Amino acid sequence: MTNNIEWQDQNGNWHHYRTKQNQADAYRVAQRRAESTKKRHRLVDGDGRLLDVIDF
């Protein structure tokens, strides 16, 4: 199962950042990047369903 990490810009648009196969690893990457960039990130599965939203 693929997990896409996306980030949200200042206009509310979502942009693809990276695709990971392991959900736990995808969550860790998104959480670290959200803290470092101060931007909202989300995890979306391969079918486009929202898995989680991570705020900084």
Image: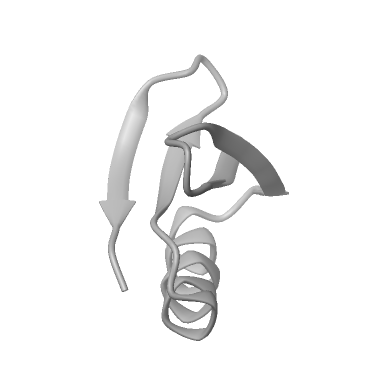
> Which percent across, then down, holds residue 19?
70, 46
Q: Quadrant of residue 40?
A: bottom left
Which residue lies at the image location 48% right of the left edge and 30% below the top edge? Answer: 45
> Which percent across, then down, holds residue 6?
56, 44
Work out whether residue 42 or residue 38 is closer to the camera in this orientation and state it.
38
> Which percent across, then down, holds residue 28?
46, 74
Above or below, 52 relative to 22: above
Above or below, 40 relative to 13: below
The reply, left or right, for residue 24 in relation to residue 37 is left
- Total marks shown come to 0
Looking at this rendering, what residue extends furthest in the front direction?
11
> Which percent across, then down, holds residue 26?
53, 60
Image quarter hosting the N terminus: top right
Which residue lies at the image location 56% right of the left edge and 55% below the top edge? Answer: 22
Above or below, 49 relative to 45: above
Work out whether residue 47 or residue 53 is closer to the camera in this orientation and state it.
53
Image quarter hosting the C terminus: bottom left
